[in-house]
Image (spheres, coloured by chain):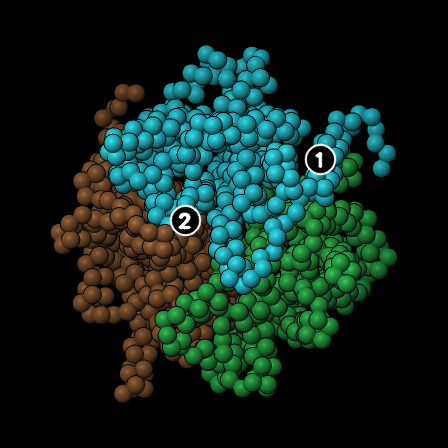
Chain colours: A green, B cyan, C brown
């Protein structure tokens, strides 16, 4: 069990994580409590309905992040196992870190922190930003680098989210702007900072093989299926949530078909590209997030889905090679095409929707 | 980017799909709207409870169709990736096409179409028929042929369903007759029409290997787990839905065990056949659909499950080779054994149940 | 179809299962009925809310047992397909057998047996003990031996559970004591009894390969995601259930991170061991079960999760080799580390929690 000095860097990761876990326990011991137990039976039912009616949505989102996104990232065959593990580890670390930071912020204003499922969900959303940003540097960064990135990204996300939602008053139920656009450009920045040197040759682990494609596609499909839960979980229950579910379903279905159309037309042999299918099908879900619960005409949802799938596939075909050549910007999973471009499209759509609605009512 | 003339057929698919997606957008823009927003808070809760209480069931069914059925179809190893993609594409296309057709039918009677989750669910059920029928010709038809089949099958299904449910007044919550029996014989008809020529040699892609079996079995298990949601989603909430869930669980559990019994007895070396297990375990779910919510004695559910598993496995062992030899009818996935025979058994059971119940009450 | 005498043992399995299935049908026909249909609409809503509000939890648990646990057991590559099949068969057999036994017990006291989803769930919990115990002898026992084990284990479990919960009055919502500790030592006993002879050489099927690791890890992640449903399903709806969900989430998240810390520190090259990750991440869920719904300070949950992950990984590193050497006790999946040690830890924690609470109130 003697540890030779050469393994010192390998000891860095467990030491850092161990200290973090200890700090979390201390934080919990000192500052966190549960909600007061409800006094009456009727109250209990109310709690049951209000606080943990989000539990089924929460589980769906956990499946998306742990299983779906994990499998999606296994497309680099020899890196598959690590990708799944790192994704799992980063999710847990970022979620706890966001819980601590949000708790501390809250503590300075209100004292004792009351934990509930809604706070966990908000922390999970913060963790999503890290998991997206990782896509830009997948397979090229060490676990330690990933953890450092997560440690920095969570507070910056919380600040950005506070500015956008609380200060600017933007309604963004599906996190199009606060999660997708933010994490995309953060990830690209990290990629640029870490690998600003000359163009690197492709790491041998980075060449996908047919055998790994199947698992990766299954991951995409899991994300596709549960995406409506992700968008709708924070909506007002009732009409708004119902509308958010419908709009997301329609947008993603239109995305799937449009992706096949555009990808088949672009490829020389008319074959469908796996990367296009995986990203294009989800692009509609990214774009719809910010407008999903608005009372807009139903045609807007499939139209936005189609448009964002188009933009995503065109981005893969033309923009990614351009960025790589001109800016030596390496974007491993193409997060700019899946999260950046459709996110901007969704933000533009929300501006339009607000303008149209305000005209109608004025 | 110049397209040589020889690739013309490969351009057919995206052009067809592109036109379809455009038509759908036009249809949505002209005719579809959402339900009026509810005026009051109490109303909102009512909407929440009534309209989208089916959302968890809906998600379960999406998992079944996109992930479960997709994986099930990957048993042809080199065709696995295409099977997953085609299944996904066909589901989206058929669902949208059914949405348009149902909307138009409704429009001629009632004007403006109000979209809700229930209408999406009905369209999803229509799409299931296409996904089942595909099983007869899996791996032998081009994507274009599959799309043409879907285009024809959806309106025929809607007409058949209207005749059976509205005109004849048959109650079929689990779609045993309207979905399973219909799509089975439709698929066999298409198989006969497309490949009526002499017996073809087995395509090399059609030989399963052990490595692909695991994924295919996982797909089966996903279908097996979520089948109760598929049967119960359209039931009356309360006792009927509770009964439908219980009956489906019991029928499928009995199916699983009976399949092992019958398959082990039939195989010369006493080993369990994967194909038998995959289909026999699900046969109970097909048969129970039409009687699941009826107030019949509980023994009927496991009895029906056992019987249909028996019929399914015997069909694979004796009927499929016979059909192939005598009628040159090729049934790639054995849909006649999984959907045809158990469906007929379920229909017979429902007739018996109705006769017994009417005697009791008269 | 002639059966040569040499295949007689291979006929044992189907004959046994066939007789069992027949007996179950007889039992259902004679003794089982459904609940009386509710007379009024309001009643119906009550039934809907009370009896099958557990349905989403039930589905989550089915996914855990059929898909998650099944995949987890595929880590022995050439045995993967059998592991998945045996797991599925044993689950169905044990569930039905527990249903029969519980029904008979109930019948002697109250007459006619009224079936509902809650009874199915209780039977499913009984089946879990069998699936856990199998982990000790995975890949070394024939299907017949597994079935005999299940036949014996279910009645012993029911008796033990009755003693612990009804006689001793222990509250154990997550089954830490009644399920995990019991099945662990039952499985180890069976392993000792079956293979008490000299140490066997490792069966070639027992050597994991990288390719099978990915699927096995996916199974673990599915279990990890849905574990809160398993712990919370039997809790009192409202505050207690909400607390159980939160505590389980926190415990499992802390487990995941602590596992990485301890495993990396223990391994000579600082690499994370797959076996450690798979078991350590779940250890928190095992330990938290017995205290999950208690009103304890929130810090207890992550602390217990961290501790049990530590104990689990240390068990793999030091205790398992010791047991194998000193007691010639072979524990294929290390169930003693995942279910035994964290279970004991959880039981100790519950004693402490009860003592502290009673002091507070006295």
Instruction: Identify the disc placed on residue B237.
Output: 2
- Residue depth check, mark 1 versus mark 2: number of the one nearer the observer: 2
Question: In the image, residue A314 lies at what x, y percent?
Answer: 78, 47
Labels in figure, total = 2
Identify which residue is drawn at 31% across, 75% down: C350
Q: Residues within 10 Å of mark 2 (few under 14, many from 20)?
A: some
Chain under disc 1? B
**Residue behind mark 1:** B20
User: Which residue is more in the foreground, A215 or C98?
Assistant: C98
Percent from the top left, x then y, of residue B304?
A: 32, 33
Q: Nearer the N terminus, badge 1 or badge 2? A: 1
B19 lies left or right of B189: right
Quadrant of residue B124 within the rendered picture: top right
Left or right, B278 with reference to B118: left
Q: Residue at x 58, y 47 (%)?
A: B116
* Residue C170 at x, y percent in the picture: 25, 70
Q: Is residue A289 above or below residue A261?
A: below
């Amino acid at each position: 069990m003697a540890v030779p000095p050469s393994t010192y860097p390998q000891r860095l990761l467990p030491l850092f994580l161990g200290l973090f876990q200890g700090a979390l326990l201390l934080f919990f011991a000192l500052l966190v409590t549960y909600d007061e137990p409800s006094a009456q039976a009727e109250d209990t039912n109310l709690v049951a309905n209000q606080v943990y009616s989000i539990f089924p949505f929460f589980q769906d989102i956990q499946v998306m992040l742990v299983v779906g996104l994990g499998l999606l990232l296994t497309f680099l065959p020899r890196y598959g196992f690590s990708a799944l593990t790192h994704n799992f580890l980063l999710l847990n670390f970022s979620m706890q870190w966001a819980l601590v930071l949000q708790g501390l912020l809250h503590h300075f204003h209100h004292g004792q922190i009351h934990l509930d499922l809604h706070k966990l969900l908000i922390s999970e959303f913060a963790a999503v930003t890290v998991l997206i940003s990782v896509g830009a540097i997948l397979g090229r960064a060490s676990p330690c680098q990933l953890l450092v990135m997560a440690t920095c990204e969570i507070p910056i996300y919380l600040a950005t989210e506070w500015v956008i939602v609380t200060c600017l008053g933007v309604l963004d139920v599906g996190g199009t702007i606060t999660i997708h656009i933010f994490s995309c450009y953060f990830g690209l920045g990290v990629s640029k900072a870490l690998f600003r040197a000359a163009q690197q040759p492709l790491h041998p682990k980075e060449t996908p093989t047919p055998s790994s494609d199947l698992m990766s596609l299954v991951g995409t499909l899991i994300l596709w299926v549960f995406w409506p839960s992700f968008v709708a979980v924070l909506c007002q229950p009732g009409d708004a949530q119902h509308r958010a579910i419908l709009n997301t379903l329609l947008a993603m279905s239109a995305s799937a078909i449009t992706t096949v159309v555009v990808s088949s037309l672009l490829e020389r042999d008319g074959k469908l590209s796996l990367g296009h299918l995986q990203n294009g099908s989800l692009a509609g879900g990214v774009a719809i997030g910010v407008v999903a619960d608005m009372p807009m005409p139903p045609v807007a949802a499939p139209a936005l889905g189609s448009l964002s799938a188009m933009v995503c596939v065109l981005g893969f075909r033309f923009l990614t090679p351009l960025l790589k050549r001109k800016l030596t910007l390496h974007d491993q999973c193409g997060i700019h095409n899946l999260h950046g471009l459709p996110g901007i499209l969704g933000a533009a759509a929300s501006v339009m929707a607000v303008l149209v609605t305000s005209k109608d009512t004025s």
